[in-house]
Image (cartoon, rainbow, N blue to C red):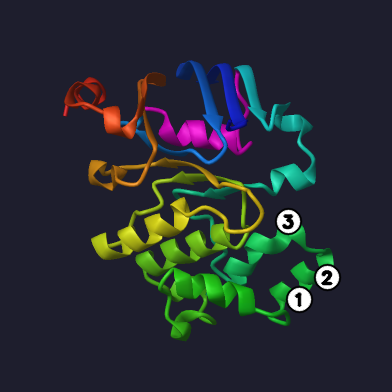
Amino acid sequence: MRNTVLELKDISYKYENNLVLKKLNLKINSGEKIALIGKSGSGKTTLISLLNGTIKQTEGEVKFFKKDFKELNNIQKRKIATIWQDLRLIDDLSAEQNVNCGLLGKKSFYFAFNNLFNMCSFKKAHQYMQLCKLHHSIFSKKVNKLSGGEKQRVAIARSLIQESEILLADEPFNNLDPKLTITIKKLLLKDKDKRDIKKTALISLHRLEQLEGFDKVIGIKNGEIIFNEERSNLKKFHLDNIYESI
C-alpha cells in the first residue's frame, strides 16, 4: 500500500480580491506520476507555488509526509524539488555552478562559498547535465550566454541533482523540441534506483500530447479541480470540460 506524501485539505488562495484557488482537496501517494492540466490562468502555477512554500494558502491545510509544511524540518524540505516556469537561474553564474546550486540544501556554507568561486567539484553536476543532453562546451559558460532550451535543461539538471522524493514542475518542457521533451520526461518520471524510494511527481503541462507516461491527470479550471482521473480513463468530455472555450 502506498503512503500519502502530499495532502490538500480545503485549500483556498486569494490574491487581492481574486479567489485564485477554491477549496481544493487532493491526496497524492508515493510514486504517483501526475500531470496537471488546464488553460493559462486556471491556477496551475499558483498551486505549484503554494505547494513549494513560495506562497501561503488563505485557507486550509497543506501536508507533506503527514505534517504541515511549516512543521517540516530541513531534511524533509530537501526531499521536495521544484522546476520553476521562470527557471530562477543565476545569470552571473556558469551553467555548472547553477546545477550545483541544487546541492546547497545538503551542503555546508563552505560548499556554497567554493561553488560561488568555482573552486568545488562539478563531477556530479556534469553527470546530470549530460543526462539532460547538455554539451560539455557549455558547462562553464555563464547562463546569460545560453539559449532558451539550454537554460531549461540547466534548471532541470539542477532539480535532478537534488535526488528528491517529490518533484514539482511547472511546464518544464518549454523551449524543448519533441525529441528532447521525450528524453527529459523519461528522466523526470524515472523512479530512484536506491533503497525503496519511489519518486512522486506533479508536473503541469501545456500540451496534451505530453500526457503519455503519467499515471493520473488532474484537470483544473478557474481555480477548481474539475477531475482527478487515471490517465487510462481520461475521455474527451474531461478535456472538453476544462478547455471548452478554446
Q: Is label 2 or label 3 in front?
A: 3
Q: Is mark 1 on a helix, strand or loop?
A: helix
Which of the two discs, 2 and 3, labels the residue nearer the N terminus?
3
x then y, percent, for residue 53? 63, 36
- Cα distance, mark 2 to mark 1? 6 Å
Q: What residue type is labelled 2?
A: Tyr
- Cα distance, mark 2 to mark 3? 12 Å
x then y, percent, for residue 245? 17, 24
x then y, percent, for residue 161? 60, 63
Tell me if label 1 and label 3 are in contact, CB under 8 Å: no
Q: What residue type is labelled 1?
A: Asn
**Residue 121 visible to an observer of this rendering:** yes
Q: Is residue 229 shown above or below 86? A: above
Q: Does the magenta stretch include residue 31?
A: no
Which of the two discs, 1 and 3, labels the residue nearer the N terminus?
3
Which residue is denoted by mark 1 in the rendering? 114
Q: Point out the stretch of residues depicted in magenta.
A: 42-58
Tell me if label 2 and label 1 are in contact, CB under 8 Å: yes
Looking at the image, residue 233 sits to the left or right of residue 11; the answer is left
The answer to which quarter of the image holds residue 241 is: top left
Q: What residue type is labelled 3?
A: Gly
Q: Is residue 144 shown above or below 103? A: below
Looking at the image, residue 40 sits to the left or right of residue 83; the answer is left
x then y, percent, for residue 191? 52, 52
Could you say which disc has been placed on residue 110 in the image? 2
Residues 8 and 231: in front is 231
Could you say which disc has been placed on residue 200 in the image? none
Could you say which disc has been placed on residue 105 in the image? 3
Q: Is residue 237 shown above or below 29? A: above
**Dot 3, crowdedness within 10 Å: few (<14), some or many (≥20)?**
some
Residue drawn where x is 38% and y is 55% of the image: 185
